[in-house]
């Protein structure tokens, strides 16, 4: 098999603006070797990522294999670096998904991805860890561009949303900030004070935003959110301190902000014609009402479909580096 140049796509920060535009526009030109093998390692449950990656490989005419922890010697003391090395001896590209376990230290899932990536000798894509989700970010940017020709000047609100049980990782808000701050000038992040994101990610996003004369506003009161949003992206996420204070206290913090739900009234208050985005899974009736999720202003179907297109284009970008 042809050995591709190793690249680690941990987040969209590992892609240039030119590459991102190429991925979003679908403007790739490269003949696909039909004998290529894509190894997909899913160490966490997945619906959209698993199926969209399989669909992407099929559309490109690639072979692919789906692997879980129980399929490998990871469950039998083999370390992550050796697993990455072994996968790269047989596969041309690798995708890894591990979002961590309840109560795990923040960043531990990201470290596991990095360990597997360090052992690999071929390109490897993060299919979501506890810090980043590049493929979803690319699909979201493509969706925004398709819906808003003048998307650069539109306002997006990325908001924490209540769920009594979801307690999701922070990968989505992190990825959205890192990616959108390179292209969109009006970003508002709204979350309760206890649910802050990594300051390094906030700082980098603000730096990127300033380079395009944009702003990132961070608010801690949902009632203070702007009333002129074009896009509202409410998403539940856990604090970065679950491992320290425990699941019971974490749940109490979530319940403290049970009013942070998104129904038609809330959406109208923040933007009379604002579109709704969510990567799913969504906790219906809590993060958002059914009328919002399934309504005419919802872009969730577009987001899901675009996962396939951006993943195919990303694979082409990586192959083009051979």
Image (tube, grey):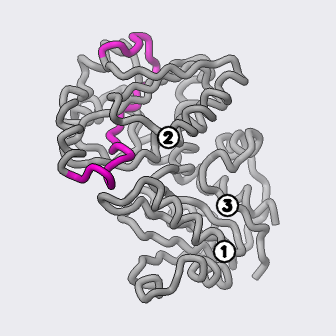
Q: What is the number of the mark on residue 8? A: 3
Name the residue located 33 percent from the left edge and 34 percent from the top edge. Answer: 194
Residue under label 2, please give it. Answer: 198
Q: Is residue 128 above or below residue 241?
A: below
Local secondary structure at mark 1: loop
Asked whether 121 falls inside the magenta stretch, the response is no
- Is 225 left, or right, of 9 in this rendering? left
Badge nearest the viewer, 1 or 2: 2
Q: Is residue 246 magenta?
A: yes
Q: Which mark is residue 120?
A: 1
From which residue to which does the magenta span run? Answer: 223-247
Q: Is residue 169 shown left or right of residue 223? A: right
Question: Residue 2: percent from the left, percent from the top?
Answer: 79, 78
- On the rendered image, what quadrant is the N terminus found in? bottom right
Residue 241 vertical placement versus 91 (above, below)? above
Give the label, 2 or 3, closer to the camera.
2
Looking at the picture, tell me which residue is in the foreground, 220 or 33. Answer: 220
Q: Is residue 61 visible?
A: no
Query: Disc 1 or 2, which lies upstream in sequence?
Result: 1
Name the residue located 73 percent from the left edge and 60 percent from the top edge: 318
**Mark 2 residue element:** loop
The quarter of the displayed image where residue 119 is located: bottom right
Q: Is disc 3 in contact with disc 1, using a CB cutoff of under 8 Å?
A: yes
| Quadrant including the C terminus | bottom right
């Amino acid at each position: 098999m042809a050995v591709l140049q190793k690249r680690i796509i941990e987040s969209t920060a590992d892609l240039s603006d030119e590459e991102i535009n190429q991925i979003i526009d679908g403007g790739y030109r490269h003949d696909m070797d039909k004998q290529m093998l894509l190894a997909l390692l899913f160490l966490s449950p997945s619906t959209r990522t698993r199926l969209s990656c399989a669909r992407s490989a099929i559309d490109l005419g690639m072979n692919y294999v789906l692997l879980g922890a129980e399929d490998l010697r990871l469950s039998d003391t083999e370390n992550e670096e050796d697993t990455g090395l072994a996968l790269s001896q047989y596969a041309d590209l690798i995708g890894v998904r591990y979002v961590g376990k309840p109560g795990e230290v923040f960043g531990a899932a990201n470290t596991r991805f990095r360990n597997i990536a360090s052992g690999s000798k071929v390109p490897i894509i993060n299919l979501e860890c506890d810090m980043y989700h590049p493929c979803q970010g690319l699909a979201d940017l493509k969706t925004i561009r398709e819906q808003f020709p003048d998307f650069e000047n539109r306002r997006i609100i990325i908001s924490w949303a209540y769920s009594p049980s979801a307690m999701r990782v922070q990968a989505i808000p992190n990825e959205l900030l890192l990616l959108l701050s390179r292209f969109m000038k009006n970003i508002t992040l709204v979350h309760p004070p206890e649910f802050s994101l990594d300051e390094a990610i906030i700082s980098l996003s603000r730096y990127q935003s300033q380079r395009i004369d944009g702003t990132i506003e961070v608010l801690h009161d949902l009632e203070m959110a702007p009333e002129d949003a074009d896009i509202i992206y409410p998403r539940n996420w856990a604090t970065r301190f679950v491992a320290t204070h425990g699941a019971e206290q974490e749940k109490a913090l979530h319940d403290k902000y049970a009013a942070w739900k998104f129904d038609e009234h809330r959406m109208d208050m923040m933007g009379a014609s604002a579109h709704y985005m969510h990567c799913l899974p969504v906790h219906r009736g809590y993060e958002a009402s059914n009328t919002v999720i399934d309504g005419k202003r919802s872009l969730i179907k577009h987001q899901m479909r675009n996962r396939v297109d951006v993943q195919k284009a990303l694979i082409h970008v990586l192959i083009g580096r051979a």
